[in-house]
Amino acid sequence: MTDTSINRPLSAEELDRFGAELDALRARTVAKIGAEDARYIRRIVKAVRYTEVAGRGLLFFGLFPPAWILGTLLLGLSKILENMELGHNVIHGQYDWMNDPTLNGKTYEWDIVGTADNWRKTHNYKHHTYTNIRGLDDDIGYGVLRIFPEQKWKPIYLAQPLFAVIFALLFEWGVAIQDLRLGRWMQGKMSGAQLRKEFAPVGRKMRRQIIKDYVVFPLLAGPFFLPVLTGNVVANILRSLWTYTVIFCGHFTADVETFPKSVLRNESRGHWYLRQLRGSSNLSGGPLLHIMTGNLSHQIEHHMFPDIPARRYAEVAPEIREICARYGQRYNTGSLPKQFGQVIWRILRHSLPSRPRGDRALTLDPPRDVAAA
Amino acid sequence: MSRLLKPLIAPDVFDFWASRFNPTWSWERPLARVIERRQEARDSVTLVLQPNRHFTGFKPGQHINVTAEIDGVRVTRSYSPTGIPRADRRIALTVKRIDGGRMSTQLCDHTQVGDVLELSPAFGEMTWPQAADGRWLLLAAGSGITPLMSLTRAWAAASMPTELTLIYWARTAADLCFADELRALAAREPRFHLQLVLTRETASLDDVACTEHGAHLTTEWLQQQVPGLEQSRVYACGPASFVDDARQIAGSRAEQFHAEAFTLPAVTDDIHGTVRVELRATGRTLELPAGQPLLSALEAQGIRPAHGCRMGICNTCACGKFAGTTQDLNTGERHSEPTAALRICISRACSDLTLDL
């Protein structure tokens, strides 16, 4: 069953025009990048640093409950900003044009247990190049959850609602071990020696983060060890819950599609753009939501232009929306409760057996190499 | 102190807080504050800098990469200190404004006392040997005077037992830097011979030669100016064309010849031609076709740079470019600036390149 009511399949010629319009929008936006964007990201750095110091400072007085609550929230806020608006976007190379070694996409290391190097591979390369392609994009369910009916059902998925909650609480740890693909080791497809080798840098990063958040800062507080420790634990969990929510809303809402590997055959630029659109969903809201989500509230814009400073997404969004409308493509957006509700429904629904509806057509024409043959 | 702090705080976090107190405090980056600015000649400004303790000093004749932020972008160019090393570690850079030159315009027109610039360690081989003797000839054209001025001042300060000749080409008398100081030195010091040459103006001063009068850099002219050229050791600095001329004339005749040029490599529109690409990290130099994306051109030579999407999205292949011009194949834009992140999967070479691979 193919649902054509939402998205119109495009002809090859239409796809080329669709791609050209987005390329032109991209070029216009890139031409504007400059001093303003540099000032903005430096302000974000400043906000991260000051909220961290304020949060950690207040936690030292954590025996006094209001100080503990405010300190924990500020530290969580700092970690969220550092993770999303600063780290995620800098690691994409969005600010490489500044030539600032502290904001360089290839060397930036962020304040979470996962290494930036693994992220560059699983996220920047695999997820952004092969977005929502089954078997290539490891972010489809993160190897833990069954989000789409195309994933094979196993009885263990009956416990998925519980896994999903645990995974949300420990999201940064899940991301940290994602690239180790422990499943392959458990199935005997990877040797223990290989796993140990790949774990070494991950383990070092984990140790550094544990020592910093759970040993050094609590010890610095002397007799107030415990409130500082719990404040750090809760701040990290808050950050995990928030990033999980935002990221799941980006690709796991109701109408988001996944694709078979065959879409890659001679994929044109227009087709790649279309796949990014069909595989992503946005969150509607104001500037505060955009900053707090690292502008992943503009998941569609981010997937089309992952290397453009994210603060520009809000500015290009109306034009992208207009282009989508002209080409009969749905621009998937909604409030956070609405989109996250759909995510929860998917998690619950696909914990039970479900049957794929069949892929919706992206294009009218057969793949080009076949047409040419 | 730094060893104690290292496990606790990342260098960029340290730098953030340190710079709240003093803009030149840093974990490891050599930074310098501009403490004086003065007009040296028409279109030329001298900036006196006070570096922090991470700057390790220079030898007269060496160069330093100076980085300034212009419209949010950090731009880097090489300059030569014109003075000699001092006890207070201050360095003086003389910058000539070049039409359309991003960095020189910034430094000449916009940089103020109190601004902070980033420095690199000093580099360059055009320095005085341990025990200099014999005859030395310095050939300077335009901004090429800067390292040679430093050598001249070092010579005067140490009263070196050598004969020193400086020939300095400038467009007009107003473009000459340090002219009074050089003339005074020539008047005071019989072993120092000075020849100033103007290429765009007929001067009325009797110590200034002009190209109209045959002061083009030719073999005859040089031999007439510098008796004993064959026994001289020569340093030349200036634009590439000048350095080429100097090398042709003096390179084979002089006892020793060393030159440094400061122009961009030629940009080619010929996508069927080849360019020379130096891979600095691996120490290899290759001839690559100019028309191809650098990634596939390198792969064709058996090099395997890190890469991912091959379409300019994932940033995996981004590598440093020290010098040369490239073209973004998606946008057609040209980039001549050195950069920390060149995406080689969607860039082709338009000139010889030096990459951090």
Image (cartoon, coloured by chain):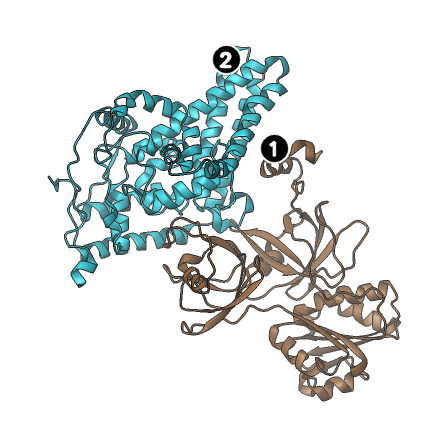
Chain colours: A cyan, B brown
Residue at (70% x, 71% y) in the render = B176
**Apparent side of residue B11 relative to residue A17 in the rendered image (left or right):** right
Residue at (51% x, 39% y) in the render = A109
Which residue is identified by label 1? B9
The answer to whether residue A103 is visible is yes
What secondary structure is marked by label 2? helix
Q: How many marks?
A: 2
Judging depth in this view, the residue of A328 and B173 nearest the camera is A328
Instruction: Give amino acid for label 2.
Output: Pro
Question: Which image quarter holds the C terminus of chain A?
Answer: bottom left
Classify A36 as above or below A287: below
Extreme top residue here?
A: A64
Instruction: Give amino acid for label 1.
Output: Ile
Crowd around label 1: few <14 · some 14–19 · many ≥20 (10 Å): few
Classify B199 as above or below A127: below
Which residue is identified by label 2? A66
Which label sits on residue B121?
none
Where does the image place residue B319, in percent across and percent down from the top left? 50, 54
Judging depth in this view, the residue of A41 and A82 nearest the camera is A82
* Residues flagged by tags 1 and 2 on a common chain: no
Question: Which image quarter holds the N terminus of chain A?
Answer: top left
Q: Which chain carries label 1?
A: B
Where does the image place residue A283, in percent across and percent down from the top left? 30, 33
What secondary structure is marked by label 1? loop
Where does the image place residue A96, in percent across and percent down from the top left? 48, 49
